[in-house]
Image (cartoon, rainbow, N blue to C red):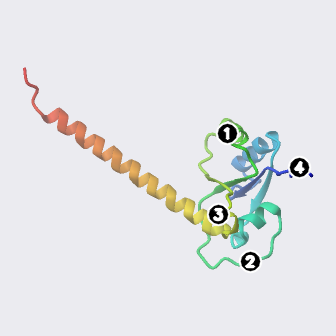
Amino acid sequence: MKARVVKEVVLLYRLEEDTELGKAIAEAVSRAGASCRYVAADQVGETVGNLVSGSIEGKEYTGEVPEHSAMVFSGFTRNRLDDVLNRLQTADSRNKAMKAVVTDMNREWAFGDLVKELTREREAIRKQLLAQQEKAKAEQEEASSVPQQQ
C-alpha cells in the first residue's frame, strides 16, 4: 500500500508577488518548504480544491469579487501550520490577510464564497469585540462614579 503524500500549498489572494508584502510571504512559505499558488481576481469562481490542485477550469464567479486579501492553507498538520504562521508573523507583521484552512466542507466552495465568508466572520468578531470593549468601559465608568464608602 502506497503512502499518500499530501503537498502543502498556500493559496494567496491579493498578495501579489510583485509587492513587498507578497514577496515576504512567498519567501517565508518557501523557506518552510511549502509552495504558493497565486489566485487572480478572475479565478475566484474556481473551487478551493481546484485551486489547490492547480486544475483551473475557467469557472466564472457570479458574486462580487472580494476585496480583502486571503491566505488559504492546504495539506498542513497543526504543528506545521503553527510553524508557517509563526514564520509569516516574523517575516512581516503587516500581514493582515484573512487566513483559512481547506476542509472537506469548503473544498467544493467557490474561492470567492470562501473569502466572503471569512470577511463576514471577521466583521462579526470585530463587532463582538467592540461591544465587549464598550461594555467594559461602561462598567468601569459606572464603578468609578459610585461614591466610595468609608
What kind of element bears circle 3?
loop
Depicted 42 relative to depicted 21: above or below: below
Single out the mark in the foreground, 2 or 3: 3
Question: Does residue 87 sit above or below 36 in this rendering?
Answer: above
Q: Does the CB distance between marks 4 and 1 fall below 8 Å?
A: no
Q: Residues within 10 Å of mark 3 (few under 14, many from 20)?
A: few
> What residue is drawn where x is 72% and y is 46%?
25
Q: CA distance from mark 4 to mark 1?
A: 24 Å
Q: Which mark is residue 82?
A: 1
Q: Is residue 114 left or right of residue 75?
A: left
Question: Which is closer to the viewer, label 1 or label 2?
Answer: 1
Q: Give the residue number, with chain letter if any, for mark 3.
A: 105
Work out whether mark 4 precedes mark 1 in sequence or the reverse, and give the earlier one: 4
Going by the numbered disc 4, the residue's amino acid type is Ala
Which callout, 3 or 4, points to the residue nearer the camera?
Answer: 4
Q: Residue furthest right?
A: 1
Q: If you read the primary sequence from the N terminus, does the residue marked by circle 2 or circle 3 appear first?
A: 2
Q: Residue at x 83, y 51 (%)?
A: 7
Dot 1: element:
helix
**Who comes first in sequence, dot 3 or dot 4?**
4
Callout 1–callout 2 Cβ contact below 8 Å? no
Amino acid type, callout 1: Asp
Instruction: Please say if 13 is above or below 91.
Output: below
Q: CA distance from mark 1 to mark 2?
A: 32 Å
Name the residue beneath numbered marker 4. Answer: 3
Q: Is 31 on the left-hand or right-hand side of 139?
A: right
**Residue, disc 2:** 59
Q: Quadrant of the C terminus?
A: top left
Q: Are marks 3 and 4 in contact (CB under 8 Å)?
A: no
